[in-house]
Image: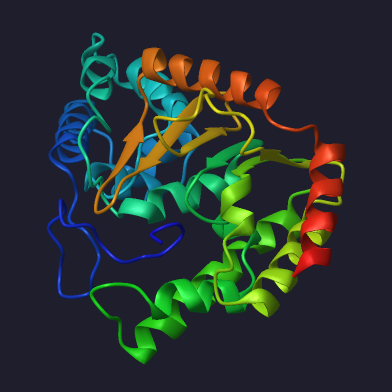
């Protein structure tokens, strides 16, 4: 039930605001970058235009609170003549669980991505959930949340869904296990409306939805959920979630493996057309 929420994980140290502290790897990159920038005699305001980012972005990266895009690292190396040091540190960014701002880092990436791929075997992806479905998940979450926390999380989730409406040039792909759609989360009426929402949200030609049938006994996604995103710089990143932990992945080798699995999942799932037909049949039985 962590998809799209802004609560922290048990692997992360939190502030009084609930915002996770920067991870050691992000802080290390930020400190190294700051040292090279100061060696070059540049303020953040002077430096930002040289790497084509805002001063606020530079500040966030140096504080370890923002994930540095690969394009930023490449430009920083050239501008600061960093001898490959920043690239070396960058290789270790994101390897530990509970990165700075946890899911918010991924949510920021979603807003800029040109491709977003999601495989889910636990629940309907957050970008497709109805308010009633999301409310059921958050209301039943353990430890129990306060009413104000539930409302805040529902609001945040519904706001994220504007991506599907406002980014017609982004390629969205969703693969969801059939059993997730057959589980009557919230009751038959909630699931009926949930299926309606999926059918409506995945109607545009840039949004693809596939069902992984229960008849497919073995497939490439048995290791768990997968999320992949392609940035404007054509860099691919990944995000994985567990019970009380999360992992933001930048390793090209690991991302290559996840791409291989996702590509196989697409071939093993029902076609988008057959998936829509199945959804309509399932809706009729509720």
Residue 158 seen in this snapshot: yes
Looking at this view, name the residue that lies furthest to the bottom: 147
Instruction: Kindly indicate the quadrant of the structure image that contains residue 280.
Output: bottom right
Quarter containing the N terminus: bottom left
Of residues 35 and 129, which is closer to you in this image? 129
Q: Nearer the viewer, residue 13 or 147?
A: 147
| Numbered circles on residues, count | 0
Image coords of residue 170 (percent x, y): 72, 41
Asked if residue 39 lies left or right of residue 142, the reply is: left
Q: Quadrant of the C terminus?
A: bottom right
- Vertically, is 170 above or below 285? above
**Quarter of the view holding residue 238:** top left
Q: Is residue 229 left or right of residue 106?
A: right
Q: Please state which of residues 262 and 51 is positioned toward the viewer in this rendering.
A: 262
Q: Quadrant of residue 175?
A: top right
Residue at the top extreme, as displayed = 83
- Give how far across and how far down residue 18 sits, in percent: 23, 70
Query: Where 12 sits versus 253, above or below?
Result: below
Residue shown at 47% from the left, 51% from the top: 122
Looking at the picture, tell me which residue is in the foreground, 21 or 116. Answer: 116
Q: Is residue 196 visible?
A: no
Q: How is the image coloured?
A: rainbow
Q: Residue 212, position in %: x, y?
A: 64, 37
Residue located 41% across and 15% down the image: 252
For image coordinates 38% across by 12% down, the residue present is 253
Residue at 21 percent across and 15 percent down: it is 85
Where's residue 282, x and y in %? 77, 58
């Amino acid at each position: 039930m962590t998809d799209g929420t802004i609560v922290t994980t048990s692997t992360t140290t939190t502030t009084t605001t609930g915002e996770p502290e920067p991870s050691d790897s992000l802080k290390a990159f930020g400190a190294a970058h700051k040292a090279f920038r100061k060696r070059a005699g540049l303020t953040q305001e002077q430096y930002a235009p040289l790497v084509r980012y805002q001063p606020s972005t530079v500040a966030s990266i140096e504080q370890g609170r923002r994930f540095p895009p690969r394009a930023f690292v490449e430009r920083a190396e050239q501008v600061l003549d960093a001898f490959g040091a920043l690239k070396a540190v960058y290789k270790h960014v994101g390897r530990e669980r509970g990165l700075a701002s946890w899911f918010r880092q991924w949510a920021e990436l979603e807003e800029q991505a040109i491709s977003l791929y999601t495989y889910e075997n636990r629940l309907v992806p957050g970008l497709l959930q109805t308010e009633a479905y999301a409310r059921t998940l958050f209301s039943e979450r353990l430890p129990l949340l306060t009413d104000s926390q539930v409302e805040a999380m529902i609001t945040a989730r519904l706001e994220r869904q504007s991506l599907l409406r406002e980014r017609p040039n982004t390629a969205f792909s969703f693969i969801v296990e059939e059993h997730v759609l057959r589980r009557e989360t919230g009751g038959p009426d909630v699931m009926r409306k949930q299926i309606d929402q999926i059918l409506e949200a995945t109607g545009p030609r840039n949004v693809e939805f596939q069902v992984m049938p229960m008849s497919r006994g073995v497939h490439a996604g048995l290791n768990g959920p997968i999320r992949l995103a392609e940035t404007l710089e054509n860099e691919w990143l990944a995000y994985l979630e567990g019970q009380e932990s999360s992992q933001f992945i930048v390793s090209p080798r690991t991302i290559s493996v996840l791409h291989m699995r996702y590509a196989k999942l697409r071939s093993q799932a029902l076609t988008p057309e057959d998936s829509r037909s199945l959804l309509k049949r399932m809706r009729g039985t509720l």
